[in-house]
């Protein structure tokens, strides 16, 4: 699928993997609602998301490998991704396949949720 939103989601992952925090935050609404997949709970707003990732990147090195990106009938965009988490020395700590679902406010991500175990569905 190729749409402006899907392309934006793909660019978000690329910026995340490159640790370009400013580029990732620019894709988000100021009051973005984002999951805290590392510690649990949710983050509200760009500042909380930025602080979360800065703390995370001091401890671990998560990378996302994007599979398919599709727009759903309800207007959300789903991205099926493999997450690989390494320690600072490069040792793999975890791998998981998940589906991230993005809701938008205009061109910006308003909310992202994680559907664990859903990455393999069609």
Image (spheres, helix red, strand yellow):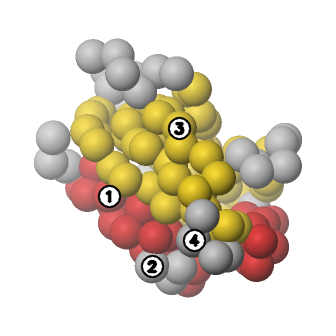
Name the residue that disc number 4 marks: 90
Residue identified by numbered label 3: 96
Question: Whole-percent x and y of residue 32?
Answer: 67, 55
Residue at image x 38%, y 37%?
80
Residue under label 1, please give it: 10
Q: Sequence-wise, which precedes: disc 4 or disc 2?
A: 2
- 80 sits to left or right of 23: left
Circles 4, 2 touching at the beta carbon (< 8 Å): no
**Picture quadrant of residue 54:** bottom right
Alpha carbon separation for disc pair 4 and 3: 17 Å
- Disc 2 designates what residue? 18
Q: Quadrant of the N terminus?
A: top left
Image mark for residue 60: none
| Residue 18 drawn above or below residue 38 | below
Q: Is residue 23 above or below residue 77?
A: below
Q: Can residue 69 be seen at all in this image of the molecule?
A: yes
Which residue appears at 57% of the width and 26% of the height? 116
User: How far separated are the C-alphas under marks 4 and 2?
Assistant: 16 Å
């Amino acid at each position: 699928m190729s749409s402006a939103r899907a392309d934006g989601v793909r660019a978000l992952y690329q910026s995340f993997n490159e640790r370009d925090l400013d580029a990732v935050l620019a894709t988000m609404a100021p009051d973005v609602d984002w999951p805290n997949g590392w510690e649990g709970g949710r983050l509200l707003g760009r500042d909380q998301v930025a602080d979360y990732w800065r703390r995370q990147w001091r401890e671990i090195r998560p990378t996302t490998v994007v599979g398919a990106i599709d727009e759903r009938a309800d207007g959300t965009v789903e991205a099926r991704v493999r997450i690989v988490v390494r320690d600072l020395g490069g040792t793999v700590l975890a791998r998981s396949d998940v589906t991230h679902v993005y809701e938008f406010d205009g061109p910006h991500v308003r909310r992202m949720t994680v559907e664990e175990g859903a990455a393999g569905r069609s």
